[in-house]
Image (cartoon, grey):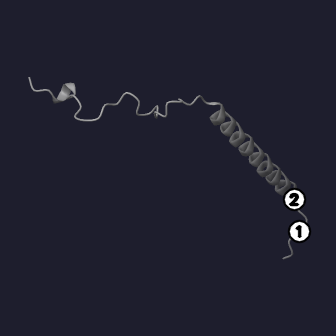
Protein backbone atom coordinates (compact mmCIF):
# COMPACT_ATOMS: atom_id res chain seq x y z
CA UNK A 1 0.00 0.00 0.00
CA UNK A 2 1.12 3.50 -0.68
CA UNK A 3 1.83 5.84 2.18
CA UNK A 4 0.97 9.49 2.44
CA UNK A 5 4.17 11.37 1.56
CA UNK A 6 3.00 14.67 3.02
CA UNK A 7 3.93 15.44 6.62
CA UNK A 8 1.03 15.19 8.95
CA UNK A 9 -0.11 17.66 11.55
CA UNK A 10 1.14 15.33 14.26
CA UNK A 11 4.66 15.43 12.82
CA UNK A 12 4.59 19.22 12.71
CA UNK A 13 3.51 19.27 16.37
CA UNK A 14 6.33 16.90 17.32
CA UNK A 15 8.87 19.05 15.50
CA UNK A 16 7.54 22.19 17.21
CA UNK A 17 7.82 20.47 20.58
CA UNK A 18 11.41 19.42 19.83
CA UNK A 19 12.39 22.95 18.83
CA UNK A 20 10.74 24.41 21.93
CA UNK A 21 12.48 21.86 24.17
CA UNK A 22 15.85 22.71 22.61
CA UNK A 23 15.25 26.41 23.20
CA UNK A 24 14.29 25.78 26.83
CA UNK A 25 17.43 23.71 27.40
CA UNK A 26 19.61 26.41 25.83
CA UNK A 27 18.01 29.07 28.04
CA UNK A 28 18.52 26.90 31.13
CA UNK A 29 22.19 26.38 30.22
CA UNK A 30 22.67 30.14 29.83
CA UNK A 31 21.00 30.78 33.21
CA UNK A 32 23.25 28.24 34.91
CA UNK A 33 26.33 29.67 33.24
CA UNK A 34 25.35 33.22 34.28
CA UNK A 35 24.54 32.11 37.84
CA UNK A 36 27.86 30.31 38.14
CA UNK A 37 29.75 33.40 36.95
CA UNK A 38 27.93 35.65 39.43
CA UNK A 39 28.55 33.32 42.35
CA UNK A 40 30.91 34.68 45.00
CA UNK A 41 34.24 32.90 45.15
CA UNK A 42 36.51 33.13 48.18
CA UNK A 43 39.62 35.08 47.28
CA UNK A 44 41.87 33.21 49.69
CA UNK A 45 41.87 30.07 47.55
CA UNK A 46 40.21 27.79 50.13
CA UNK A 47 37.69 25.32 48.82
CA UNK A 48 34.40 25.99 50.67
CA UNK A 49 33.56 22.27 50.65
CA UNK A 50 36.55 21.41 52.81
CA UNK A 51 36.87 24.63 54.83
CA UNK A 52 37.05 23.88 58.54
CA UNK A 53 38.12 20.24 58.18
CA UNK A 54 41.22 19.43 60.18
CA UNK A 55 43.63 16.75 58.99
CA UNK A 56 44.47 13.84 61.21
CA UNK A 57 42.44 11.54 63.40
CA UNK A 58 38.89 12.69 64.01
CA UNK A 59 37.08 12.36 67.34
CA UNK A 60 34.96 9.24 67.77
CA UNK A 61 31.26 9.45 67.07
CA UNK A 62 28.77 8.95 69.93
CA UNK A 63 27.95 5.40 68.86
CA UNK A 64 31.64 4.45 68.81
CA UNK A 65 32.34 5.46 72.41
CA UNK A 66 32.57 2.63 74.92
CA UNK A 67 30.61 3.11 78.11
| Name of the residue lying farthest toward the top | 67
Decide which of 22, 18 is in the foreground and name it.
Answer: 22
Q: Nearer the viewer, residue 61 or 54?
A: 54
Q: CA distance from mark 1 to mark 2?
A: 9 Å
Residue 3 coordinates in the image, percent (x, y): 86, 71
Disc 1 to disc 2: CB gap under 8 Å: yes
Please, what secondary structure does the residue beneath circle 1 have? loop
Q: Is residue 4 above or below residue 39?
A: below
10 horizontally vs 62: left or right: right
- Residue lying at the far left in this picture: please name it: 67
Q: Which residue is mark 1?
A: 4
Q: Is residue 34 left or right of residue 56?
A: right
Left or right: residue 50 versus residue 42 is left
Q: Position of residue 45 (x, y in %)?
A: 49, 34
> How dense is the environment of label 2, judged by Cα within 10 Å: few (below 14), some, or many (20 and up)?
few
Name the quadrant containing residue 35: top right
Q: Which residue is the site of mark 2?
A: 8
Q: Residue furthest bottom?
A: 1
| Whole-percent x, y for residue 34 in the image | 69, 36
Q: Identify the residue at horizontal 61%, vertical 30% (top origin).
A: 39
Q: Secondary structure at mark 2?
A: loop
Amino acid sequence: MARNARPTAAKREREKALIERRQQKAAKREDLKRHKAEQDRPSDGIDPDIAGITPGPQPLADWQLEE
